[in-house]
Image: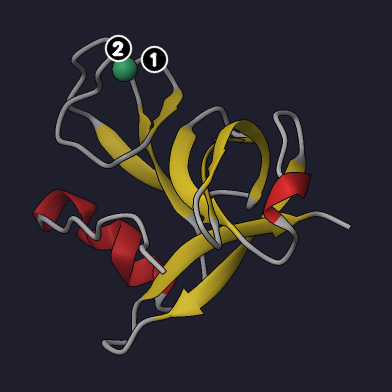
């Protein structure tokens, strides 16, 4: 199964460190008080550089989904307002439709980090 590319950089390190505890965190801009994902050095909305980290609920809604052979690549809108590229698992790909409520689940990686995936909330 192809998972989303694991880009890492110093700026995304806190995101990946939190995955070791199965905690989903989002970068927030102090200036416009909005979440940012994927992590970056400058807020894409207001170009603010005062960014911090806050835990996310893990609840999301499918914004767009594409069924591949045996899995689903999806864009999900997190409850906090950020959009994330991920895979939706734990159900038949045909069940993954726009508007489906999903919740984060974790796939542990060999290096101790974990990949945030989503499954239908039940
Ligand atoms: Zn901002």
Q: Is residue 91 above or below residue 108?
A: above
Q: Mark 2 sits on what residue?
A: 45
Between marks 1 and 2 in the image, the one whose residue lies nearer the viewer: 2
Q: Mark 1 sits on what residue?
A: 32
Quarter of the rendering containing residue 6: bottom left
Q: Position of residue 37 (x, y in %)?
A: 36, 37
Q: Secondary structure at mark 2?
A: loop
Q: Is mark 2 within 8 Å of ligand 1?
A: yes
Q: Of the two numbered discs 1 and 2 on the same chain, state the one appearing first in sequence.
A: 1
Marks 1 and 2, Cα distance to the nearest angstrom?
8 Å
Split into quadrants, the picture shows ligand 1 in the one at top left
Would residue 48 appear left or right of 110 to someone viewing this image? left
Q: Residue furthest front?
A: 69
Q: Position of residue 38 (x, y in %)?
A: 31, 40
Q: Which mark is residue 87?
A: none
Is label 1 in contact with label 2 (beta carbons under 8 Å)? Answer: yes
Q: Residue at x 48, y 32 (%)?
A: 83
Quarter that holds the C terminus? bottom right
Say if residue 54 shows up in the picture.
Answer: no
Q: Residues within 10 Å of mark 2 (few under 14, many from 20)?
A: few
Quarter that holds the N terminus? bottom left
Say if residue 36 shows up in the picture.
Answer: yes
Q: Is mark 1 within 8 Å of ligand 1?
A: yes
């Amino acid at each position: 199964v192809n998972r989303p590319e694991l880009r890492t950089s110093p700026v995304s390190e806190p995101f990946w460190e939190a995955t070791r505890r199965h905690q989903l965190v989002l970068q927030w801009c102090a200036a416009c008080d909005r979440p940012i994902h994927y992590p970056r050095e400058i807020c894409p909305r207001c170009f603010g550089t005062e960014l911090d980290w806050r835990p996310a609920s893990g609840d999301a809604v499918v914004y767009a989904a594409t069924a591949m052979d045996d899995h689903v690549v999806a864009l999900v809108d997190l409850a906090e307002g950020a959009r994330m590229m991920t895979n939706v698992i734990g159900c038949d790909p045909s069940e993954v439709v726009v508007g489906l409520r999903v919740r984060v689940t974790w796939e542990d990686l060999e290096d101790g980090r974990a990949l945030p995936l989503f499954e239908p909330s039940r």
